[in-house]
Amino acid sequence: MIYLDNNATTQASESVLSAVVKYMSKCFSNASATTAAFTGADIPRRNAASQMAKILNAEEPETFFFTSGATEANNWVFASIAATVRTGTILISSIEHPSVREPAERLSRQGFNLQLVPVDSHGVVCLEALGLLLSPDVVLVSIMAANNETGVLQSIGEIGKLVRDKAPTALFHTDATQAVGKIAIDLQKEWKEVDLLSFSAHKFNGPKGVGGLYCRPGIDVTPLLVGGGQEQGARSGTTNTPGLAGLAAAVNEIEITAFGEVRQKRDYLEQQLLKLAPILIHSVGAPRLPNTCCFSIPECFGDDLVTELAAQGIIVGSGSACSSGSQEPAQTLLAMGVDYQVALGTIRVSLGPTTSVEELDFFLDRLKKTLMSS
């Protein structure tokens, strides 16, 4: 199998698997038990928090709260706003993941004023429009760091400065699920205005079912889950020690510099794609994740192509994996002004550090033959 859908999920390494198995088979004790210090069950969480603080240059490990993943973390942010603020304006971009968009819409139905920040034709948030929407009434701004469909990177530093200038009391949240592990993030420098940040381990070669929320010191979030007091009283539930052991191991293996070579392979892929057919590659004029190529083939259906390629052993995406089964095109592309029919013919290829040029050539060959036979 040739796997080219790393934005959907990634493969865990042997060291990650070993870490997970260890805390399922040998050190399987409950991390909340009074004997945790003797059994070692409390170690994975400490290691995970320390590793996350290191890779993101956070103030301290205590700023991290672990969840079942970014979807829970995103929902937690909006639920906390509803529980503490009660009213006000919420700003999200028009290309947010459903785990941000749908909780925001729920708050809108509860009386909050929800405003969508538009993006340009490349999928970049319009800073001028954001500036006009910001006011002292804004209680939360949530802008994703990197888009899961196009790979477009937002200027989190500039957005943060704008939020602080025009809505100084607002919380600034970023869903960094696609960014962590692929680009350098510094929460004490360029990203110093970020108050809350969500992430999932399975996007950077960790296990599924574990992720978390970074909360800058001084920022309190109302617990979404109660009844146990875990996560410093912020998130109840038995600690996922195997998942956290795997997360820590995955973070320890992250090499941001490796994505320089990934970018070269992605660029090679795009050069070859343009020779195959009248293909439209999205967001080439914007900063993007180094591993992501999102393109449309007019008069084709992306879902059909993805299925045909999968039958030949090649796994690619047709938009967001979280919306699989839907025949609707990606919301991101429509927000960018892409024609509906063109958006239907979209494929997303997302490379990993181990993706080879030979694999890309095989994909290109099979794609060409598939297009010729259709």
Image (cartoon, rainbow, N blue to C red):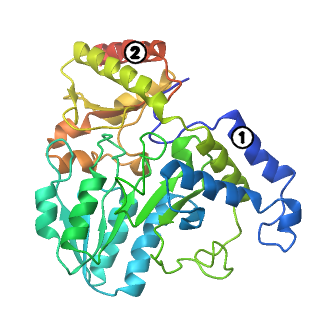
Q: Are marks 1 and 2 in contact (CB under 8 Å)?
A: no
Counting residues from the start of the chain, the first of labels 1 and 2 encountered is: 1
Q: Position of residue 372 (x, y in %)?
A: 29, 13
The local crowd at label 2, few if under 14, some if 14 to 19, many if 20 or more residues have their Cα within 10 Å, is some
Occupied quadrant, residue 132: bottom left
Occupied quadrant, residue 187: bottom left
The quadrant of the rendering that contains the C terminus is top left
Circle 2 sits on which residue? 366
Occupied quadrant, residue 136: bottom left
Q: Position of residue 312 (x, y in %)?
A: 49, 20
Q: At x 46% / y 59%, what residue is drawn? A: 198
- In three-dimensional space, the C-alpha distance between marks 1 and 2, rounded to whole angstroms, equals 32 Å
Q: Position of residue 9 (x, y in %)?
A: 51, 41
Circle 1 sits on which residue? 17
Residue 95 appears in the rendering: no
SS for tag 2? helix
Pick the front one: 281 or 250: 250
Q: Position of residue 156 (x, y in %)?
A: 30, 54
Say whether residue 163 is left or right of residue 28. Answer: left
Q: At x 17% / y 43%, what residue is drawn? A: 340
> Amino acid under label 2?
Arg
> Amino acid under label 1?
Leu
Residue 110 appears in the rendering: yes
328 to 301, vertically: above or below: below
SS for tag 1? helix
